[in-house]
Image (cartoon, rainbow, N blue to C red):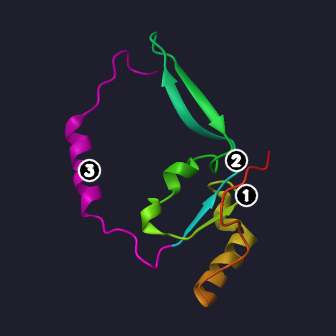
């Protein structure tokens, strides 16, 4: 059950922000492989009566919305997308082959370079 009047804990948010600011940014060693085309909660609103309303799209891996997985565009992190779930990505043969390509050749053509809806 959700609290009647939930409050943000500013101390916890400040500590989290301090940790985030200490993390190094991505460099040329970074590559993102993300799952997509899975039913994912990508938005939420809260009505005056406290009820939540969720927006689902296929722009994510069923757990993480693709917009939350992506790096800032200025980081120029190569992004490869697989039509797999959050948990399924580690067992996907195509993803494993793409990782092998990336480690041995520095690139792969096994996954889409940009997200395309299957709908």
> From which residue to which does the magenta span run?
1-30
Q: Which residue is mark 1?
A: 83
| Mark 3 and mark 2 residues within 8 Å of each other at the beta carbon | no
Q: Which residue is mark 3?
A: 17
The percent position of residue 104, horizontal first and vertical second, equals: 61, 90
The quarter of the rendered structure image containing the C terminus is top right
* Front one among 20 and 78: 78
Q: Which residue is rendered at x = 68% and y = 59% of the image?
A: 88
Q: CA distance from mark 1 to mark 2?
A: 7 Å
The percent position of residue 105, horizontal first and vertical second, equals: 63, 89
Q: Which residue is mark 2?
A: 38
Looking at marks 1 and 3 on the same chain, the residue that comes earlier in the sequence is marked by 3
| Mark 1 and mark 2 residues within 8 Å of each other at the beta carbon | yes
In the image, residue 27 lies in the stretch drawn in magenta: yes
In the picture as drawn, the residue positioned furthest to the right comes out as 119
Q: Local crowd at mark 3 within 10 Å, few (<14), some, or many (≥20)?
A: few
């Amino acid at each position: 059950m959700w609290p009647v009047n939930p409050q943000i804990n500013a101390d916890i948010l400040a500590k989290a922000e301090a940790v985030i600011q200490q993390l190094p940014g991505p460099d040329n060693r970074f590559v993102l492989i993300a799952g997509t085309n899975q039913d994912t909660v990508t938005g939420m609103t809260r009505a005056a009566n406290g009820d939540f309303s969720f927006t689902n799209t296929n722009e994510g891996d069923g757990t993480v919305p693709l917009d939350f997985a992506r790096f800032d565009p200025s980081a120029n992190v190569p992004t490869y997308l697989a039509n797999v779930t959050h948990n399924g990505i580690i067992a996907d043969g195509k993803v494993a082959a793409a990782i092998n390509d990336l480690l041995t050749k520095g690139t792969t053509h096994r996954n889409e370079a940009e997200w395309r809806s299957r709908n």
